[in-house]
Image (spheres, rainbow, N blue to C red):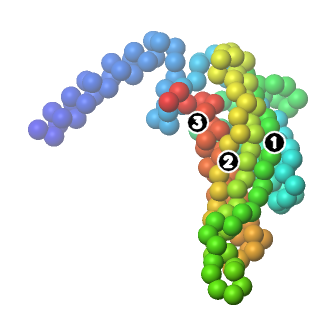
Amino acid sequence: MNKLFKFSRVLILLPLFALSACTGVRFTFSGVNIDPAIKTFSVEQYTNEASDGPPTMAFTFTDELTQYILRNTSLTMAPQGLKGDLEFGGAITGYRVTPVSPGGGEQQQTEQQRLTITVKTNFINNFDDEKSFEQGFSFFFDFPGTQNVQDVESEAVDIIFEQIVYDTFQKALADW
């Protein structure tokens, strides 16, 4: 019974893979759908337009986006100074700390704070202009009101950028 089940799965999956090979569209298990003619990408250095935050934020975001694309696609980086088939660029436009839940008592200290970072991305698909976009992506990290943002900043920025990179990648390269 077990061998029959495995064999039937192969019989079902084999034609699907063969059909996708004939259509000229590459599918991956990550949901990425890239035209086979697209071979390269470029990521222009993001800038930091936010008034606060660590001075290396823009460099960190640019590097994390680049590495994520390299790990999750078969695309290669365009040679330095040249534009890729897919182009990414943009700016960190927001870095703000806001109180989430006010505390009680005489000192009126906030019980929880939220760091929110916003990144605006300009994506250009040189093969299909309809897939190009300019959009802001943001995410947040909550931390205790007893801590300063500098106490959690490194961890918070890592978590926030991980989500924004994922959201940017999905918007640009996944046809969900």
Helix, strand or loop at label 2? It is strand
Which residue in the rendered view is the most extreme toward the top?
22
Q: Is residue 29 above or below residue 131?
A: below
Closest to the observer: 104 or 57? 104
Q: Amino acid at mark 1?
A: Ala
Total numbered badges shown on the rendered structure: 3
Can the viewer see residue 151?
yes
Would you say the residues marked 1 and 3 are in contact, meaning their CB atoms lie under 8 Å apart? Answer: no
State which tag comes first along the sequence, 1 or 3: 1
Q: Within 10 angstroms of label 2, few (less than 14), some, or many (20 or more) residues? A: some
Image coordinates for residue 78, horizontal then vertical, percent: 78, 28
Q: Earlier in the sequence, mark 2 or mark 1?
A: 1
How far is mark 2 from mark 1, CA to CA? Answer: 12 Å
Q: CA distance from mark 3 to mark 2?
A: 14 Å
In the image, taking residue 6 as reference, residue 57 lies left or right, namely right
Q: Is residue 151 left or right of residue 82?
A: left
Between the C-alphas of marks 1 and 3, the distance is: 18 Å
Give me the residue at 58% from left, 36% from top.
170
Q: Residues within 10 Å of mark 3 (few under 14, many from 20)?
A: some
Camera-nearest label, 1 or 3 = 1
Q: Which mark is residue 164?
A: none
Q: Determine the residue positioned at 80% across, 37% down.
A: 90
Q: Callout 1: few (<14), some (14-19), or many (20+) C-alpha neighbours within 10 Å?
A: many
Q: Quadrant of the N terminus?
A: top left
**Which callout, 3 or 2, points to the residue nearer the camera?**
2
Q: Is residue 89 left or right of residue 168?
A: right
Are the residues flagged by discs 3 and 2 in contact, CB closer than 8 Å? no
Residue 154, position as x, y percentages in the image? 73, 65
Measured as percent of width and height from the top left, residue 131 is found at 64, 22
> Residue under circle 2?
138
Q: Which residue is mark 3?
A: 170
